[in-house]
């Protein structure tokens, strides 16, 4: 606890001297004994209608390539974060990327890991370490740390996807490395068959045991397809849903059963019509993207209404409950849970009163 005394002349001189000597009295630090994570960073929501309109305007004002940006991306910055953090949460950043037909994003690699959740368009692909990965709505693909990656699009309509990266975590700790694939910048040529990892490991439970197990700490399966995920979710609906998760499936490394990457885990949550989860809170920072349907969430007592392709973030130790409105809803989620688990810092808690539901005392309104 901080010591609140009016410093006398000797104490004042002591404070001035130790400050000059780069020392700080611990008894002046009011946050050192905080009993739980502080709530300065708030949940936030980015509506798809706004995001899509902005992305299509970016198409008109910002070319990609030699005369423009490497990548046409709008990042979703949570305005309640400290000014030095440009993320959506303290550890994760969500962004929206649009690639027009015929465009290419040159290959590079960095220590920051990424996944890409596809929202609209057909005919785009990303090349990760020489492997072209087909991108279709509802799929997500991995770009693990330090893997080469670039994008190309040969379809007839714009491709839009959401990127989720651990940029705030890695950059915040000054652990970033970055490298261009070539100079001048080019797309890495494909040297593996298209969707190679999906062919080899895509069933998850049938593995070619003579190949694929690798030393790398991420899933060798680089693409997770939406139709198979959706089918797996609906196979569970004869069972009782988790009271706090709905029907939830975590994407895993098929060899280890662990998370898809060491810093980001991914899951898909089906909320059947009328299902309203009970509130819980945990240590993760979690980004949700509405894969299908509409509904609302109550986050620390504030109501967030959402519809298809909206994105929202739930920060550390924030009460969260989710409900489908007007039919089934499916939420894609990406979180920093593997980091917390690796550091043995993960905690969670369920909301014990009022049937597990918080009173909603306000409603989130996005800025226009
Ligand atoms: Fe990148």
Image: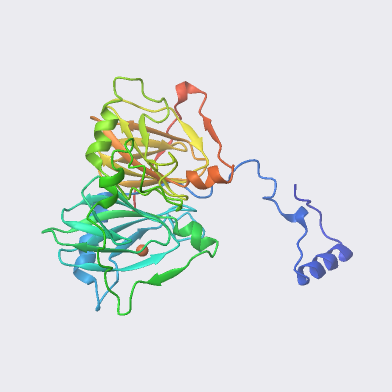
Observer-nearest of 86 and 148: 148
Position of residue 3 measured from the top left corner of the image (x, y, whole percent):
79, 51
Is residue 83 among the parts visible in the rendering? no
Position of residue 310 measured from the top left corner of the image (x, y, whole percent):
29, 46
- Name the image quarter holding residue 298: top left
Position of residue 34 measured from the top left corner of the image (x, y, whole percent):
66, 45
How many marks can you see? 0
Observer-nearest of 330 and 279: 330
* Relative height, residue 177 to residue 232 (above, below): below
Q: Ligand 1 is found in which quarter of the picture?
A: bottom left
Is residue 111 among the parts visible in the rendering? yes
Q: Residue at x 38, y 56 (%)?
A: 114
Q: Residue at x 27, y 26 (%)?
A: 235
Position of residue 296 measured from the top left corner of the image (x, y, whole percent):
33, 36
Quadrant assignment for the C terminus: bottom left
Query: In this view, which residue lies farthest toward the left?
Result: 156
Observer-nearest of 353 and 335: 335
* Relative height, residue 302 to residue 5 (above, below): above
Q: Is residue 34 left or right of residue 253?
A: right
Q: Is residue 17 left or right of residue 97?
A: right
Observer-nearest of 169 and 250: 250
């Amino acid at each position: 606890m901080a010591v609140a005394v009016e410093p006398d002349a000797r104490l004042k001189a002591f404070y001035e001297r130790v400050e000059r000597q780069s020392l700080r009295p611990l008894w002046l630090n009011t946050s050192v004994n905080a009993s739980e994570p502080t709530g300065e960073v708030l949940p936030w929501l980015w509506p798809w209608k706004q995001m899509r309109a902005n992305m299509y305007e970016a198409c008109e004002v910002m070319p990609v390539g030699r005369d423009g940006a490497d990548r046409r991306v709008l990042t979703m910055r949570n305005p309640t974060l400290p000014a030095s953090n440009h993320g959506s949460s303290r550890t994760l950043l969500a962004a929206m990327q649009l690639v027009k037909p015929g465009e290419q994003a040159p290959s590079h690699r960095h220590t920051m890991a990424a996944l890409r959740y596809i929202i609209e368009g057909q005919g785009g692909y990303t090349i990760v370490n020489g492997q072209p990965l087909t991108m279709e709505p509802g799929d997500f693909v991995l770009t693990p740390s330090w893997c080469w990656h670039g994008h190309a699009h040969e379809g007839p309509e714009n491709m839009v996807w959401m990127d989720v990266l651990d940029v705030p975590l890695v950059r915040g700790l000054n652990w970033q490395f970055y490298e261009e694939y070539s100079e001048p910048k080019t797309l890495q040529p494909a040297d593996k068959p298209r969707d190679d990892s999906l062919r080899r490991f895509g069933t998850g439970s049938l593995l070619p045991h003579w190949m694929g197990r690798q030393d790398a700490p991420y899933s060798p399966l680089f693409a997770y397809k939406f139709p198979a995920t959706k089918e797996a979710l609906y196979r569970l609906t004869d069972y009782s849903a988790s009271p706090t998760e709905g029907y939830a499936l975590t994407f895993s490394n098929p060899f280890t059963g662990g998370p898809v990457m060491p810093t980001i885990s991914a899951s898909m949550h089906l909320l059947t019509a009328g299902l309203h989860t009970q509130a819980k809170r945990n240590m993760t920072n979690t980004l949700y993207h509405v894969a299908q349907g509409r509904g609302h969430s109550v986050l620390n007592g504030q109501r967030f209404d959402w519809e298809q392709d909206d994105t929202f973030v739930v920060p550390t130790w924030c009460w969260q409950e989710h409900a489908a409105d007007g039919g089934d809803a499916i939420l894609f989620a990406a979180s920093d849970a593997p980091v917390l688990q690796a550091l043995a810092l993960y905690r969670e808690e369920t909301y014990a009163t009022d049937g597990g539901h918080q009173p909603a005392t306000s409603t989130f309104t996005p800025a226009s």
